[in-house]
Every structure is written in structure tokens, then in C-alpha cells.
Image (cartoon, grey):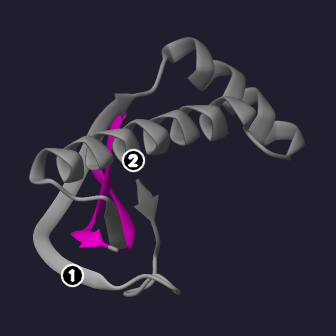
Amino acid sequence: MMLTTTEQIVGKKIVQTLGVARGNTIRARHIGKDILAALKTLVGGEIEEYTKLIAEAREQAIDRMVDSAREMGANAVVSVRFTTSYVMGTASEILAYGTAVVVE
């Protein structure tokens, strides 16, 4: 499955547009990681625990978007975008979406 943030794929021709493919996940923070993160804010630097959490959530959202596109019969997704939303105090949603297409 080809994924791109552009509207076209260089060297490929879009022969069919199938619709919006999307995948999401909602992840909650872990109290133990919150404590480590709070300590990290005292000294500064990257909060690796949250970086890893968001990276895993993004990959899961991409996987689900790809599954959605495959179910529609697509072999590519163009105009891929990500969005996040705050669900509750300790949970956020990551949504990956794009246009499922058939290219040749």
C-alpha cells in the first residue's frame, strides 16, 4: 500500500477514487509515566515516555487507515493527514485519514 501526503503519486496514474479511508486510536496516559514526565519537566528535555506513546498511537492509526483502504479495494492512499483531539483529561485520539485510490 502506497501512502503519500500529496494529491498525486509521481509516476502513477490514479484510475479510481474510492473515498475517505480513516483509522483512529484513543490512548490514555499511564499514571507511572505521568510521574516520570513530571520529574522530567523539572530538568527539561524530551519526555521519551510520551514520545513513544504518541508514535505507537500514530502507527496504529495508520495501520487501521490502511486496513480501511484495503477493504475498499485501494492500493494507495493520497492526501494523508493526521489530527489529534483531546478526549478527556488523560486520553487523546489520533486520527489518520486520506483518500483511498487505485493507481496503475
Instruction: Name which residue lies at 48% across and 18% down.
Output: 30
Q: Position of residue 57 (x, y in %)?
A: 44, 37
Q: Position of residue 35 (x, y in %)?
A: 64, 20
Label 1 environment density (alpha carbons within 10 Å; few <14, some 14–19, many ≥20): few
Of residue 54 and residue 33, the one placed in the foreground of this image is 54
Q: Is residue 99 visible?
A: yes
Instruction: Give the vertical position of 65 relative to 56 (above or below).
Output: below
Of residue 4 and residue 10, the one placed in the foreground of this image is 10
Instruction: Name which residue lies at 25% across and 47% down.
Output: 23
Where disc 2 sits, the SS reads: helix
Per the rendered image, the range of residues in magenta is 79-103
Where disc 1 sits, the SS reads: strand
Quadrant in the picture for residue 14: bottom left
The residue at which mark 1 appears reads as 15
Instruction: Give the vertical position of 62 relative to 39 (above or below).
Output: below
Q: Earlier in the sequence, mark 2 or mark 1?
A: 1
Tag in front: 2 or 1:
1
The residue at which mark 2 appears reads as 62
